[in-house]
Image (cartoon, rainbow, N blue to C red):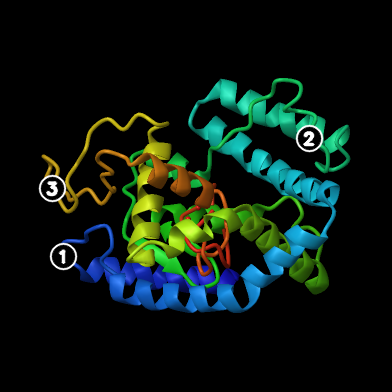
């Protein structure tokens, strides 16, 4: 995964440099091929596995797994909030980590929500956006899903700085990431029907993901709407996606998907946060 992320990032940078006027999806032909690969993998492996997981694993176990990964999300969200000077959000996320990791037995039990500690949704992609880094081209990563070049900092940062990376074991890595993918994919199973009803799944996931990210970077209050491919006053093209009026169903799907870190491959119709490595088609149809 480490080599995959770094190689994809380098290729995207080269492609961006070679394209004089990058719109939000300058790599669409390649992205579509990657999406087709991810989708096929999802249909063959990830979706059936996630479905069996939901149907046969006891609910308390599923909830514990979701809380465990949610606690790790809170860990990273704390630092992302601090880097954006969002003190209140950082306190809430940090308090959740402290309480849920200790009293919640490593995050398996979520005591923080019941104590009024709000769950944060900050990530390192938002941090870069906060400091003015443009989004760069839209990317569909194999075995991961939708991202922008700027948002690749989130999965890369998580990989190298994860709180459990001190465990040096191939078996642990396989088990950890496999469970993460299955849990992420299970969150968006209900969105499959919505995604499959779209005339162009790829475009639907892309637009929903970019709409969600645009809103997230500005905490739900974008300062302006810039036409795609437009040029700022300083002559530099702004690659951020302009969502324009947001269709409620699309926005909701984007939110759910993004949260999923899945991969997109599958059917992550767009991303929950998140958002879902292998699979979810859109990525967590989701940073």
Q: Where does the image place residue 50, in percent across and percent down from the top left?
A: 69, 64
Give whichever of discs 1 and 2 has the lower sequence position: 1
Q: Where does the image place residue 68, in percent across and percent down from the top left?
A: 77, 46
The residue carrying pointer 1 sits among few (fewer than 14), some (14 to 19) or many (20 or more) residues within 10 Å by Cα, namely: few
- Asked if marks 1 and 2 touch (Cβ < 8 Å), the reply is no
Which residue is drawn at the image coordinates 36% and 68% (left, top)?
12
> Which element is circle 3 on?
loop
Which residue is drawn at the image coordinates 69% and 64% (left, top)?
51
- Circle on res. 231: 3
In this rendering, which labeled residue sits more in front, label 2 or label 3? 2
Quarter-of-image position of residue 216: top left
- Circle on res. 158: none
Q: Is residue 268 above or below residue 3?
A: above
Residue tagged by mark 1? 20
Q: How many marks?
A: 3
- Asked if marks 3 and 1 touch (Cβ < 8 Å), the reply is no
In this rendering, does residue 75 appear at all? yes
> Which element is circle 1 on?
loop
- Circle on res. 110: 2
The residue carrying pointer 3 sits among few (fewer than 14), some (14 to 19) or many (20 or more) residues within 10 Å by Cα, namely: some
């Amino acid at each position: 995964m480490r080599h995959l992320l770094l190689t994809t990032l380098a290729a995207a940078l080269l492609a961006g440099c070679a394209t004089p006027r990058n719109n939000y999806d300058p790599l669409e032909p390649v992205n579509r091929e990657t999406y087709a690969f991810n989708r096929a993998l999802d249909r063959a492996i990830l979706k059936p596995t996630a479905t069996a997981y939901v149907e046969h694993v006891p609910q308390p176990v599923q909830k514990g797994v979701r809380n465990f990964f949610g606690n790790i999300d809170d860990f990273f969200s704390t630092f992302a909030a601090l880097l954006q000077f969002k003190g209140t959000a950082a306190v809430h996320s940090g308090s959740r980590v402290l309480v849920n990791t200790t009293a919640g037995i490593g995050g398996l039990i979520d005591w923080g929500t019941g104590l009024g500690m709000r769950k944060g949704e900050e990530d390192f992609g938002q941090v870069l956006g906060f400091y003015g880094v443009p989004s760069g081209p839209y990317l569909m990563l194999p075995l991961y899903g939708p991202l922008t070049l700027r948002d690749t900092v989130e999965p890369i940062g998580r990989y190298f700085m994860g709180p459990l990376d001190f465990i040096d074991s191939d078996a642990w890595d396989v088990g950890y990431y496999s469970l993460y993918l299955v849990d992420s994919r299970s969150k968006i199973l209900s969105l499959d029907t919505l995604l499959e009803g779209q005339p162009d799944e790829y475009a639907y996931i892309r637009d929903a993901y970019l709409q969600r990210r645009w809103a997230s970077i500005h905490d739900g209050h974008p300062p302006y709407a810039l036409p795609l491919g437009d040029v700022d006053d300083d002559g530099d093209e702004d690659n951020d996606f302009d969502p324009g009026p947001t269709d409620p169903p699309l926005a909701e799907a984007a939110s759910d998907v993004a949260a999923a870190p899945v991969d997109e491959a599958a059917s992550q119709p767009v991303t929950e946060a998140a958002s879902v490595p292998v699979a979810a088609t859109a990525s967590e149809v989701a940073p």
